[in-house]
Image: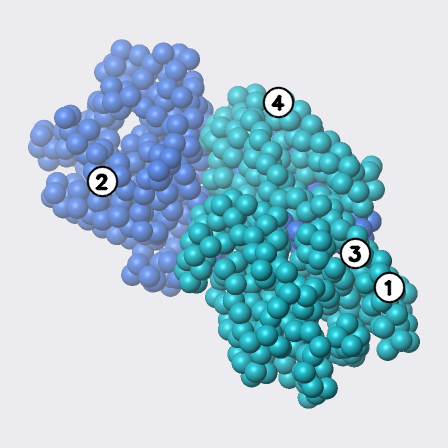
Chain colours: A blue, B cyan
Amino acid sequence: MSDFAALWSELEPIGRAEDGGYHRLAWTGADLECRRWFRARAERLGLLLDEDPNGNQWAWWGEPSPGGVVTGSHLDSVPGGGAFDGPLGVVSAFLALERLRAGGRPSRPVAVVNFADEEGGRFGVATLGSRLLTGSIDPGRAAALTDAAGVTLADAWRANGLDPARAGADPERLARIGTSVDLHVEQGRRLVDVGVPVGVATAVWPHGRWRYELSGRGDHAGTTRLADRSDPVLPLAHTVLAARAAAEEAGAVATVGRIAVHPGAVNAIASRATAWLDARAPDESVVRSVVAEVTASAEAAAGLHGVGVSVAEESWSGGATFGSELRGRLAGVVGGRLGSVAELPTGAGHDAAVLAAAGVPAAMLFVRNPTGTSHDPAESATVEDCLAGVDALTAVLGDLLS
Amino acid sequence: MSDFAALWSELEPIGRAEDGGYHRLAWTGADLECRRWFRARAERLGLLLDEDPNGNQWAWWGEPSPGGVVTGSHLDSVPGGGAFDGPLGVVSAFLALERLRAGGRPSRPVAVVNFADEEGGRFGVATLGSRLLTGSIDPGRAAALTDAAGVTLADAWRANGLDPARAGADPERLARIGTSVDLHVEQGRRLVDVGVPVGVATAVWPHGRWRYELSGRGDHAGTTRLADRSDPVLPLAHTVLAARAAAEEAGAVATVGRIAVHPGAVNAIASRATAWLDARAPDESVVRSVVAEVTASAEAAAGLHGVGVSVAEESWSGGATFGSELRGRLAGVVGGRLGSVAELPTGAGHDAAVLAAAGVPAAMLFVRNPTGTSHDPAESATVEDCLAGVDALTAVLGDLLS
């Protein structure tokens, strides 16, 4: 078994459902098990473990000080996600560090990072660990977020020994990241199309999440005349279709992947229906215009059905273009090491984009994904490509530390 | 406090949520507490308690034998239902029996009944207790029904001391019901419009429940091009709108009050989406044509989006016209007692319709509901009208026993 396969097999069973989907929502049992794995791995390599007040885990080689090199990703997942989204970057980072250590002490401190709650699959806001670290989200707002069961993030923090009063911007730890390079499985088919195993990210699209709450009047499904109804499920359906139409028109992507209907009885008209909209595009103005159009459609349909509507922006990520200097350096090193490299943008959000937006020199490597699928059990990567990713990351870190 | 208010206050807190909605799903803690209340009430009145293999509870005054008179309703609720739907009939039945007992032994045995699992809020099929009793559902099919958590009805039965092998048609107990008269809160505004507190049911509309399963392909909401998607939420939205349009066109009612989207991540395209359709009309052929039209629309939309669709009929209730002789007798007695009475059909399903379809002489009384709302916390009835209902039921039972 390769060192990659050995390490991978340690994480593989954690939080995996029967259909192969992973359920490692932030601060749940499976996520905590992944965090224990991170701790044990840091200890085995003799790295200095630092768990910060925002829940991020750092494993430092060399005393942490300003201007270090940081690599890693996250270990949480969306509900029913794939195996690679996140863990591939953390595992690759540990392996790259192990290889570099054969060459003696680094010129700068280097860390593997596991950013907390990257997916937002439980509390609704993605990249929370890096947003809190960089001060790009108010820690009070984050602490008050609730999961589907009504548990607040503050509760989840406290249950795991974190003090909500200490969460928030952490300039000292942020300054330790002189350069950030994260590796991630590609969440599309670009590298398949161009036939190379590893790519360099050019940009992360701006994107956000909006919650559409439609409030009607619950009633009996058999005895209430159609004309007397205020059924919120009808404008919800219009909202779903409007999102697709607006995105198509604008060259954006828009998705409703989560819906809640209350009380959810088959023989009762719902009193409340909620749809969550995820919208992304190369430009912020395009995203904003799509959301404005969806909102107008939701309001028009709600009006027709006597239903109230409120729209809340649950999260906004401004997107980022990764600095061309660092990006060019990575492309040169990876191309030199593997013989070929591709450059590509992504519609997915990443902690690297949060860091870049906060002024940290950041870059990303992508590893080819044969299905192109992500956030689903079908997400995949071959062992050969994963090893190419580790090679590329090792070479990039070696270059940055040289 | 009236005897009605005293009895009502015993049931009132059981399974009530903060918003006033009741959660007494079959065989859950709140339902079991209601069943214990029924037992205690039967004991306090010195009635003979009989819990049958289908989970129905009977409290007999007089040794049960063929041709008795049965009155009652159910104590379970939809999720977030009102206080009156079911319990008003059981409480009124106990009070009527108490009053009649002052007059000595009955000419025929009389029972208060609590039919198990009337709403189908947990396992998806309504009026299960009476369907099993009358043999109008296969007990093996019923036992295999599952709730949202994957618990089978057989599991729930066993947990409560019932043997799934003993469930099913029970001709002996069925023969004990010589006449059935159930009282129920009205689930509409007819009695408000005509200004009388109590009405007599003419008919129950035929109705059913259908499950539309749409199977697509899960993927990342940010990185998957619109053209590459198989998003099942889009045909689900079309199905919801088609149901409303088809019902409007046909003079029927159709409702989607429950939706499930899997895996339900904001940043993932769903892999599966399910909508439950409730459809009702005065005639079976109209219901069938509405469902056929919704199915055709679901299939067309699914085809456009590369999504698979399957439709399952979860339950079907053929509807019933209550016998005009018994109905006329009730109207005469109630009109004589209260000075006025109304006759009205209903779109709601009831155990009385299952009994009527099985050849049992059955009838129903309705008590005025000022909001007209049901299956929602807004469902209501004044104490005066509830007492008028008890008066009417007492008079009707007295007449049947004379």
Relative image position of residue A134 (x, y in whole percent) = 39, 47
Q: Which residue is mark 2?
A: A111
Q: Nearer the viewer, residue B117 or A76?
A: B117
Q: Is residue B354 left or right of residue A78?
A: right
For badge 1, the amino acid type reads: Gly
Q: Nearer the viewer, residue B131 or A293?
A: B131
Q: Would you say the residues marked 2 and 3 are in contact, meaning their CB atoms lie under 8 Å apart?
A: no
Q: Chain of mark 3?
A: B
Q: Quadrant of the C terminus of chain A?
A: top left
Q: Indicate which label's residue lies in the foreground, 2 or 1.
A: 1
Q: Would you say the residues marked 4 and 2 are in contact, meaning their CB atoms lie under 8 Å apart?
A: no
User: Few, some or many C-alpha atoms within 10 Å of disc 4 (few <14, some 14-19, many ≥20)?
Assistant: some
Q: Which residue is mark 3?
A: B322
Relative image position of residue A360 (x, y in whole percent) = 36, 38
Q: Nearer the viewer, residue B74 or A295?
A: B74
Q: Is residue B122 above or below residue B195?
A: above
**N-term-proximal mark, 4 vs 1:** 4
Q: Chain of mark 2?
A: A
- Identify the secondary structure beneath mark 3: loop
Q: Indicate which label's residue lies in the foreground, 4 or 2.
A: 4
Q: Which residue is mark 1?
A: B328
Q: Quadrant of the N terminus of chain A?
A: top left
For badge 4, the amino acid type reads: Gly
Question: Disc 3 versus disc 4: distance between alpha carbons?
Answer: 43 Å
